[in-house]
Structures are given as C-alpha cells and as structure tokens.
Image: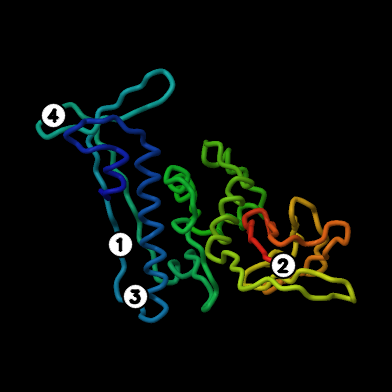
Amino acid sequence: MSSALQDEVGPASANVSWRLNDLVDSMAVELDRSRETLAVKAINKKLSYSVKEVALDVHAFLTYDGDAVRFVTAQPGQEGASKLTIQLGSITDQQVRATAKVAEPGAPRESLGELDVDEKTKSKLRKIGVSSVDDLKDLEARKVDLKEATGTDIDYSSLARKIGQSRRAKAAPSIDGVSLSQTDGEPCLLVEGRNLGVDPTFPPVAVVNDHLVEVLSSGPGHVALRLDPDHPLREDNEVVVTFDPYAVVKVNVRA
C-alpha cells in the first residue's frame, strides 16, 4: 500500500475507518503515475516485461451508518473480518502508449504541482485523472462539471484565475526605464521593459498622478502613454500601469 494511501486511510495501529472509493481512488492515482512513467520509458527502450496479475487482499470489518459503507482494517490477530480482493489484470506496452498522454517534444506542460492550488484540490483533481493544466483545458472544452465530478466546490473560474496568477508570476513585468517621447506628434511617456503587455486580450490601463491616461500602444517590451496637456508632469510623478489582472506596476518618475 502506498504512503499516500496510508496517509489517507491511516495506519493499521490507529484502526481508522475508510471508504472503499478512497482505496480505489488512491490506487488509481498510483497506477496512473506508473502508466505515465512506463509510457515515457517505452519511447527510448522497449518494455521487456509486463505485470500479468496483481491481487490485493484487504481484511476489514464492514460498518454501515444508514448512509455510507465504511471499513475498518483488521489488526493482527483479529478474527471475523471480511476479505476484500482487488484483482488487477495485465497490460501491454501498446496499451500503455495508447492510454498515456505524452507531451510533444518541446511542448511546455504545466503540472498541477506548479500551481498555487491547495493540496486538497490537487488531490481531488488527480483522482479524476487531471495532472496538468492541459488536462484542465480538455475538460473545460468538453464542458465537464468539475463540481459534479469531484464532489467539491471546484470551478473553472477559480482555477483559471490561479493558473493565470501562476503563469504571470513566472513572467513578472520588469521596468528597465521611463522616458519622454513622441507618438504621431503627441508627447507621451514611454515605459520600456520586459513582460509588459503580454496579454493581447487585455489592453493595459494607466494612471499618472491619479489621472487616467490614454494608452497609445503596448507590447511585451513597451507601453506608450499619452500625456494629457491639462495635467502636465510635475517634478515627481507617480505612474501606475495595470498590464493585466495579475500584473500591476507602480513607478516614480522625476521629470
């Protein structure tokens, strides 16, 4: 039995009750990991063996509270326990390759471990076969109800927000300099740097000295702000630029 399963079910000495679906779910997660490992290994080296049959016998006492069936693992020497037998069949290397998802060479694959998501949510997602951001996108495209599938309040909007935050944190905006310039004959403030306007669906929003200003152009390396003649620059100026929902930068500019 895996350490993850032991943590969930509890050590035998504690005699903690558990549900059958907890046992099966935990086993499925471990088997999925093994399958993915074998799929990667089979790319460079043909599998020279296969697991024909694996049987797991669990001795436990069954309890029913009128709503759910639970089990308590029998301790050494205890009698009268029921035996649950779980039989795992064989699988060929062709089946491993056909059922495992392997990323294309050079394609980025964000795992759930890289996201700022609580462990309980990650565990629920792994139990339904979600191990990466791409898996989440596939489920969203198929309009799968995560709340129904996981039995929790997980939803795509909150996950998408956390994914966006995680990705933006890896490519945070960096300001290299701010200078006065001209665009189409109009004076503007040119903000230059890296990872600035990276989201084409979100036009940056800028405020200079508490006044909203027009963004003339933007891109990953620059943002050009139109200077309002009614609100000229002062000796010291506060410039705040919201590049996207996850990136806001404030800089002080001396004119």
Looking at the image, is 102 positioned above or below residue 43? above
- Disc assigned to residue 105: none
Q: Secondary structure under badge 4?
A: loop
Q: Secondary structure under badge 3?
A: loop
- Disc assigned to residue 47: 3
Residue at the spot x=90%, y=76% of the render?
185
Looking at numbered disc 1 in the image, what kind of residue is underneath it? Lys
Residue at the spot x=51%, y=78% of the render?
105
Q: Is residue 174 left or right of residue 86?
A: right
What residue is shown with label 2? 255
What residue is shown with label 1? 52
- If the image is split into quadrants, where does the C terminus sit? bottom right
Cα separation, mark 2 vs mark 4, equals 83 Å
Of pointers 4 and 3, the one earlier in the residue sequence:
3
The color scheme shown is rainbow
Q: Are marks 2 and 4 in contact (CB under 8 Å)?
A: no
Q: Secondary structure under badge 2?
A: loop
Residue at the spot x=48%, y=60% of the render?
111
Of pointers 1 and 3, the one earlier in the residue sequence:
3
Q: Are marks 3 and 2 in contact (CB under 8 Å)?
A: no
- Residue 189 percent coordinates (x, y): 76, 69
Cα separation, mark 3 vs mark 2, equals 68 Å
- Disc assigned to residue 78: 4
Residues 114 and 178: in front is: 178
